[in-house]
């Protein structure tokens, strides 16, 4: 991966593409953000996002650099189940669709996922949830920042530090200028770019090689990739599924969009985004199966996608991959910056430090938080500590523990604070134990099972009788 | 249990059809929202 010799583009071309897209994203951030005068405009894009932009932003945010680069890697390592298992990540988006409707009806004036947890389960569960949420958000930011530097280096040979700095500065700048409106607007363009790039590469692979030849060559050289009963791949499938659900159910990236979408749009947009996202890992991943037919020697599994593209399409293919990867990185990084700054602003600054802050003050602080988050991410990413890159896998234990407290809290009056607190705490601890004791592929699974058992047990032993009207408190405190 | 080339062809073709339809659908929805003044 670090090997400059495996780059598919030269550094000059890389800099030209980076410059063109930097100018476009920053201009659009300024253009869309210039009218955002109120806090709601900046944090939640005016709470009026329509179906097209809503669907695209949900889809683009879920397409990370992992989807476009790791899907081919999984196809190369785990075969057909690798890409099919990855595509099950869409279940998180699809299951969140009905929850969005419920969230909008129960907490119509909410800002963050923390608002719901605080009002539903009280202060201590809220604080534990914030800890889990912040660990995850910072972990994802760091892994995205590092991925940006590593991928730009691997594709173009540009130094890791420069690539990482450029992608962070671009995303921080346009998020700062336009808030969630800039994030959602650019996400639409990034979605179209990602989809077009993936389509061109897939069509070309099929027309140049064809299914029959690809299948024959894989069967002759690596038949295990076509095995539908590969045990490691099946374990990966379940863990990936639960990790994805946990990520979406708890993260403010997805909750802030639930609050930002126009009434009646949220659940349809998430459902459609899930359906559109599902085939991406398959369409982006299957090209890795052409390695045998093309006679490629892949030095690092995560470079298989770019290498196949460069082999088939030459310079144009390499440029397409670079644009797809760059768009995927930016669409996730900007969303994460905006949603994490909202969480810090609403739940930490306003919730714990300055409850009486005016909208103007909050808007100013929101911008400071975005810069601070970008700066911290940059500092942590700078030394390129390899273990930090795999931080996200470790966080499966954290996020999977929140699935049941959130789902039960939204639908069951009997779900209670003690159960939710213990479910998150013991779910996370047991998941961490499983991560180190068994393997990364069971961390989310164990965490979700323990958390589910505690939530169900607490509902049976100490049922609450929650009054849903209490969730309207956000409106009352603001009016 | 080895996947046949037909299986591979079906899942990739199905995926590709949805992926090709996606940008078309998104652009149609964008135009529709824009005409109604409901982009955001």
Image (tube, coloured by chain):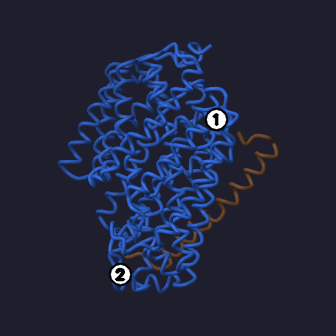
Residue A459 falls in image quadrant: top left
For residue A202, above or below residue A367? below
First reached walking from the N terminus: tag 1 or tag 2: 1
Left or right, B23 with reference to A381: right
> Can you give x and y, in whole percent of width and height, for residue A169 in the image?
49, 47
Q: Position of residue A257 (x, y in %)?
A: 57, 38
Instruction: Find chain B in the image and tell me its colour.
Output: brown
Tally the marks.
2
Label annotation for residue A45: 1
Element at badge 1? Answer: helix
B6 w.r.t. A114: above or below: below
Name the one closer to the observer, A10 or A272: A10
Q: Which mark is residue A297?
A: 2
What residue is rendered at 49% in x and 31% in y? A368
Q: What residue lies at 42% left-to-right and 51% top-to-bottom?
A: A144
Left or right: where A478 falls relative to B28: left
């Amino acid at each position: 991966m670090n090997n400059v010799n495996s780059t598919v583009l030269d550094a000059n071309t890389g800099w030209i593409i980076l410059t063109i897209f930097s100018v476009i994203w920053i201009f659009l951030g300024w253009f869309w953000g210039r009218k955002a005068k109120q806090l709601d405009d900046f944090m939640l894009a005016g709470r009026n996002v329509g179906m097209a932009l809503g669907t695209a932003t949900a889809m683009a945010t879920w397409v990370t650099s992992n989807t476009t680069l790791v899907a081919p890697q999984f196809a190369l390592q785990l075969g057909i189940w690798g890409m099919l298992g990855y595509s099950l990540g869409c279940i998180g988006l699809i299951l969140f669709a009905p929850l969005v409707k419920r969230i909008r009806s129960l907490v119509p004036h909410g800002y963050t996922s923390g608002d719901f947890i605080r009002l539903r389960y009280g202060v201590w569960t809220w604080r534990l949830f914030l800890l889990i949420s912040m660990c995850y958000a910072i972990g994802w930011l760091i892994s995205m920042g590092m991925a940006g530097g590593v991928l730009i280096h691997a594709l173009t040979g540009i130094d890791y530090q420069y690539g990482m700095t450029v992608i962070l500065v671009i995303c921080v700048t346009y998020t700062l200028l336009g808030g969630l409106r800039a994030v959602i607007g650019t996400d639409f363009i990034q979605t179209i770019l990602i989809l077009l790039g993936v389509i061109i590469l897939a069509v070309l692979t099929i027309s140049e090689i064809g299914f029959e030849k690809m299948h024959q060559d894989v069967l002759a050289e690596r038949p295990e990739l076509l095995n539908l009963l590969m045990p490691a791949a099946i374990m990966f499938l379940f863990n990936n599924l639960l990790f994805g659900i946990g990520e979406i159910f708890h993260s403010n990236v997805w909750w802030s969009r639930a609050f930002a979408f126009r009434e009646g749009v949220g659940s349809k947009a998430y459902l459609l985004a899930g359906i559109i996202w599902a085939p991406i890992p398959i369409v982006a991943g299957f090209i890795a199966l052409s390695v045998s037919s093309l006679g490629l020697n892949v030095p690092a599994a995560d470079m298989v996608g770019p290498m196949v593209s460069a082999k088939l399409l030459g310079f144009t293919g390499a440029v397409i991959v670079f644009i797809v990867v760059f768009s995927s990185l930016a669409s996730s990084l900007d969303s994460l910056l905006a949603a994490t700054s909202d969480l810090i602003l609403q739940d930490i600054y306003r919730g714990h430090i300055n409850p009486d802050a005016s909208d103007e003050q909050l808007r100013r602080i929101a911008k400071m938080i975005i810069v601070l988050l970008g700066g911290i991410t940059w500092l942590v990413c700078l030394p390129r500590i390899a273990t930090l890159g795999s931080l996200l896998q470790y966080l499966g234990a954290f996020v999977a523990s929140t699935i049941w407290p959130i789902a039960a809290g939204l639908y069951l009056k009997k779900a209670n604070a003690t159960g939710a607190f213990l479910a998150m705490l013991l779910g996370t601890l047991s998941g961490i134990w499983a991560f180190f004791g068994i393997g990364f592929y069971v961390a989310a699974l164990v965490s979700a099972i323990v958390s589910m058992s505690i939530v169900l047990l607490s509902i049976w032993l100490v049922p609450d009788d929650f009054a849903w009207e209490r969730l309207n408190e956000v409106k009352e405190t603001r009016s | 249990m080895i996947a046949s080339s037909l299986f591979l062809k079906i899942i990739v073709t199905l995926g590709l059809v949805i992926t090709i339809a996606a940008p078309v659908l998104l652009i149609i929805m964008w135009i529709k929202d824009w005409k109604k003044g409901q982009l955001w």
